[in-house]
Amino acid sequence: MSFSLRPHHKFRKVEDISPEFLRRKGVELLILDVDNTIAPYKTLTLEPAVLEWARSIKDAGVRLFIVSNNKGQRPEVFSKLLDISFIKRAGKPSPRGVREALSASGVEARRAALVGDQIYTDTIAGALAGVRVILVEPIKFTNIFLAIRYFFELPFRRARESED
């Protein structure tokens, strides 16, 4: 896949990404960002809808793997809740964490996708690692600096409006 700041696909939230969509795209491994993608910042719980979604993805044979820049306990807490592997301190936009997840899972980049909420970290990391990139809307704006960052991402967010 070629490098682009535009995600390949866009959904409102992770729960909108269906197992059928992933199957159509040939995705065997779905790499998850944590903060504002599967849970709001600073929480240590997952909404029941996210837990049910993850179960349906796993039941369909797609593996899940957390790759997060978070330095705290949240990636491990969520990995235990979902019974999946994780990498924290991934250093996105560096592709290092994504590549580590691919290697640990034994899945080729062309068979993987990364889902995240930020262009300048998640989309770049996924593009550099050669995986399909799925962008979701942030769950919750928690501070003005994050809101400003999302504002500067708008041209790239709007570039991919389809949820094909």
Image: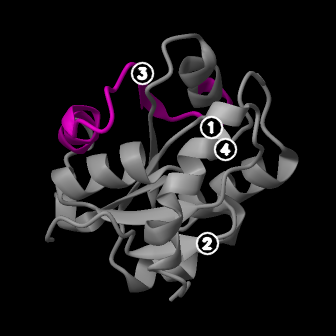
| Amino acid beneath label 1 | Leu
Which residue is drawn at the image coordinates 31% and 63% (left, top)?
5
Between residues 149 and 15, which one lies in front from this camera angle?
A: 149
**Which comes before the other along the chain, label 2 or label 4?**
2
The residues tagged by marks 3 and 1 sit, at their Cα atoms, a distance apart of: 20 Å
The residues tagged by marks 2 and 4 sit, at their Cα atoms, a distance apart of: 19 Å
For label 3, the residue is 88
Q: Secondary structure at mark 2?
A: strand
Magenta stretch contains residue 100:
yes
Percent x, y for residue 44? 76, 22
| Amino acid beneath label 4 | Ala
Percent x, y for residue 68? 45, 30
| Amino acid beneath label 2 | Phe
| Amino acid beneath label 3 | Lys
The residues tagged by marks 3 and 4 sit, at their Cα atoms, a distance apart of: 23 Å
Tell me the mark number nearer the camera, choosing from 2 and 3: 2
For label 2, the residue is 11
**Which comes before the other along the chain, label 2 or label 3?**
2
The residues tagged by marks 2 and 3 sit, at their Cα atoms, a distance apart of: 24 Å
**Which comes before the other along the chain, label 1 or label 2?**
2
Colour scheme in the image? Answer: one colour
Q: Secondary structure at mark 3?
A: loop
For label 1, the residue is 146
Tell me the mark number nearer the camera, choosing from 3 and 4: 4
Which residue is drawn at the image coordinates 51% and 81% (left, top)?
21
Location of residue 20 by image quarter: bottom right
Percent x, y for residue 84? 50, 35
* Residue 36 visible in image: no
Please state if 37 lies on the left or on the right of 1 as rendered: right
Which residue is drawn at the image coordinates 25% and 60% (left, top)?
131
Give, as a single range, the part of the protein colored magenta. 80-103
